[in-house]
Image (spheres, rainbow, N blue to C red):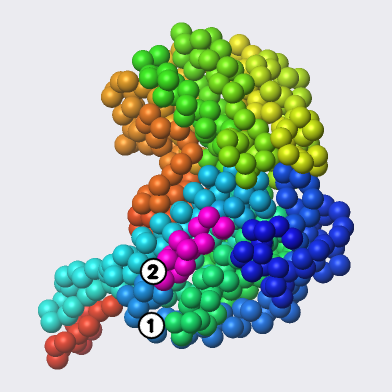
Amino acid sequence: MHDILRRLGLDKHPRVIADPTGTETPESDGVVVSFNPATGRPLAAVRLDTAEDLDRITARAAAAFDRWRRVPAPKRGEVVRCIGNAFRDRLEDLGSLVALEMGKIKAEGVGEVQETIDIADFAVGQSRMLYGKTMPSERPLHAMKEQWLPLGPVGVITAFNFPNAVWGWNAMLAAVCGDVCVWKPSLLTPLITIATNDIAERVAREMGHEDVFQYVIGTDAAVGEAMIADRRYPMISATGSCRMGRRVASVVGQRLGKCLLELGGNNAVIIEPDADLDLALKSTVFGSVGTCGQRCTTTRRLYLHESIADEFVARLARAYETVRIGDPLSEGTLVGPLITAQAVEAFENAVATAQEQGASLITGGGRVDPSRLPGDLSGGHFVTPTVLRAPANNRLPIAMEETFAPILYIFTYRTLDEAIAMHNGVDQGLSSAIFTGSSRSAERFLDPSGAGSDCGLAYVNLGTSGAEIGGAFGGEKDTGGGRESGSDSWKAYMRRQTCTTNFGETFALAQGIRFE
């Protein structure tokens, strides 16, 4: 077993089988095998939960919620503070495990765990600011206020690409709000789930609060469908594909539950002729190749003013040629592997389709021979970050779809209004950016009437990736409309109650109604 797994105690964990055998399948014989995408070889196997396990876990969560919600919010914040510190102590190991199991480079893996630490810090402060409002009553000797109350057990469904941070965004805020969490992770990243959740649960248990953090690792058929249909979960927070989000919204909506959805992104950057092109180049390269194109905020479309297009495309191609591909745990690597062999096939199909639709291949476009990379990466899922230029008519249907791979489609435009219209012309609405030296162009992109970017995240002279935890994270349209992390996102994990007290001795009705 890999040293990272040993350092995190996974070699002795009762759910983990240290020496798995089998092939790269989602699940078989009651276990799921976790593979290292850089080598294609198994890391370990994890025993799968069943529908009966989910029912037992959910019952424990409901009982834990009744205890946890009675703990004063600042005391809940103290537990979260200690959890954040426990993650600080294991930052390097957890970040390395993210890189090992998911394939993003170690710097990004460590950065992801740092996000969980940061949102824990944010949540600690929020635990003393779960503010309601007071408002004047129109009736004499009456008082009105609003208060925010814990919601209940929250089901948190996460994707493989951020196997630690997305749970953290939800769990840390939900915990200070008085909720408990049951985490259903991607079957591609079960090991980071076990390591992460066990740290949080251990800290909470040692402080006298058991079962605040639990997980269920199972198939959609066995546990996913049952979780989203279960009325004991007043809210389901789900991150994943638009297809998955529609299913979750449909089932949860049928029982009138709440959803927090973070779904697909097809993010674009506009570069104006007066932009700082050096800054735009660096931001675009990171946004398009970071995490091997497997971020929901990955830059997938680039709109260049026609006066700078040829020069910028040439510079972009040269920059792509310097990107170092290889083992995500090795220093100096900038791009690791795609998550599975199926992801490589989807990448190849998208590149071929784009060319069939008239796009010109600028750079990349194929697999990387692992034998040419340093180390033993013979079974790795490596591809070359790819740039494709749309035909002159800007018609490229494949670019309207999200392919989870490092593919950047380039278009040209004449006017900013034209660029914004093309930018907004996709189903998803997560992240967006413009590079410009003009305050007028920047404000046009951020138009407060809503006629600019139609995304949940809009950046000026910044790329589409790299959101800070202080702002609410999420998108519009097919991205689902959810908001996680900072700002007032804590309200999603609570229910609002309007309270009115009559402290007088008379019977009075609102709106001047008389009933005597």
Q: Does 168 lie within the magenta span?
A: no
Q: Give the alpha-carbon distance from disc 1 to disc 2, as whole Å.
A: 15 Å
Relative depth, front residue between 183 and 258: 183
Residue 380: percent from left, percent from top: 76, 41
Q: Earlier in the sequence, mark 1 or mark 2?
A: 1
Residue range (magenta) = 81-94
Q: Is residue 270 visible?
A: no
Q: Does 89 lie within the magenta span?
A: yes
Say whether residue 219 is left or right of residue 151: right
- Name the amino acid, label 2: Arg
Determine the residue positioned at 28% across, 78% down: 499
Instruction: Name the element at disc 1.
Output: loop
Q: Look at the picture and state if 117 lies above or below 257.
A: above
Residue 493: percent from left, percent from top: 44, 67
Residue beneath disc 2: 81
Residue 71's disc number? 1
